[in-house]
Image (cartoon, rainbow, N blue to C red):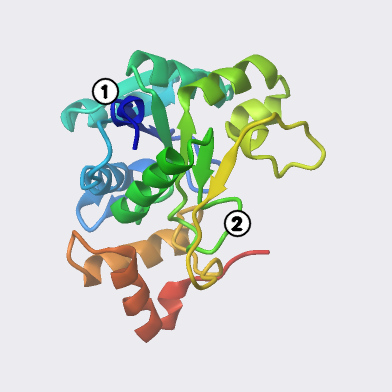
């Protein structure tokens, strides 16, 4: 790693709001006595390569409890537009003086600090604009990690005008929406040796939440994703079902 890269400030930004259409209020749903969003913060705090964590929520009154939890946890909270999430993420990144952003969505309470560190390291070693495990999917759904240079996020903000691109933040950078434009960015893929993309640990529905609660109940707080996989292999209902 070069001297300049060693000085890069890496900030995880958790994208969170209360008004999920499929499972409203899920970001504060109870998981074994702890709010889902707090579970994410606790797991990210175990990352070795993160300098800070920020919560990016909306300016809507409904998200006052999200801000309150962030303050309670000692986490900086940025509030911005509900639907222009690209702008919200960029402003949060700028205010936190980030050189590199780790984008995390608040439906991933099983997010793994080891995977996050691997993805941060991959982006730095390759010197690319963007690294993730979401373009080539081999990890379980719910371990999604995207690492982005601040310059790439700024470029996307300047060039991406379609509301869909702005709401979903990274499609302009990573591509994947054939009917929408994408920019010119260098990318790297973090992949696992086996394809486990059928495993579902994201939280979009009540059955997802129930499954995650069972995983947290059965394992120690500091469990790794491999611990969760070992448990789910013995209890296959915990692998979940990917909706096609």
Q: Which image quarter: residue 225?
A: bottom left
Q: CA distance from mark 1 to mark 2?
A: 32 Å
Q: Position of residue 174 (x, y in %)?
A: 63, 39
Foreground pick, 24 / 215: 215
Q: SS of the residue at dot 1?
A: strand
Q: Residue furthest bottom?
A: 234
Residue 3 horizontal side relative to residue 34, left or right:
right
Residue 176 horizontal side relative to residue 3, left or right:
right
Can you say whether 117 is above or below 216 in the image? above
Q: Position of residue 222 (x, y in %)?
A: 19, 59
Can you say whether 146 is above or below 67 in the image? below
Q: Position of residue 32 (x, y in %)?
A: 22, 58
Residue 87 horizontal side relative to residue 94, left or right:
right
- Report whether residue 60 is seen: yes
Q: SS of the residue at dot 2?
A: loop
In the rendered view of the protein, which quadrant contains the N terminus?
Answer: top left
Q: Which image quarter: residue 223?
A: bottom left
Q: Give the mark, 1 or 2, whose residue is nearer the N terminus.
A: 1
């Amino acid at each position: 790693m070069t001297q300049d890269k060693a000085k890069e400030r890496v900030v995880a930004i958790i994208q969170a709001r209360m008004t999920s259409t499929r499972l409203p209020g899920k970001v504060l749903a109870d998981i074994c006595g702890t709010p889902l969003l707090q579970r994410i913060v606790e797991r990210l705090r175990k990352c070795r390569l993160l300098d800070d964590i920020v919560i990016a929520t909306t300016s809507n009154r409904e998200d006052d409890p999200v801000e309150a939890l962030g303050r309670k946890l000692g986490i900086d909270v940025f509030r911005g537009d509900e639907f222009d999430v690209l702008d919200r993420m960029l402003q949060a990144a700028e205010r936190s003086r980030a050189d590199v952003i780790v984008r995390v969505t608040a439906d991933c309470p099983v997010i793994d600090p080891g995977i996050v560190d691997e993805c941060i390291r991959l982006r730095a070693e390759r010197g690319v604009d963007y690294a993730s495990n979401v373009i080539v999917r081999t990890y379980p759904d719910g371990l999604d990690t995207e690492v982005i240079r601040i310059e790439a996020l700024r470029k996307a903000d300047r060039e991406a005008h379609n509301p869909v691109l702005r709401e979903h933040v990274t499609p302009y950078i990573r591509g994947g929406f054939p009917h929408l434009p994408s920019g010119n960015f260098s990318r790297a893929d973090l992949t696992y040796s086996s394809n486990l993309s059928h495993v579902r640990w994201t939280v979009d529905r009540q059955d997802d939440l129930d499954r995650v609660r069972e995983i947290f109940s059965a394992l120690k707080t500091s469990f790794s994703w491999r611990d969760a996989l070992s448990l789910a292999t013995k209890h296959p209902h915990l692998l979940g079902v990917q909706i096609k």
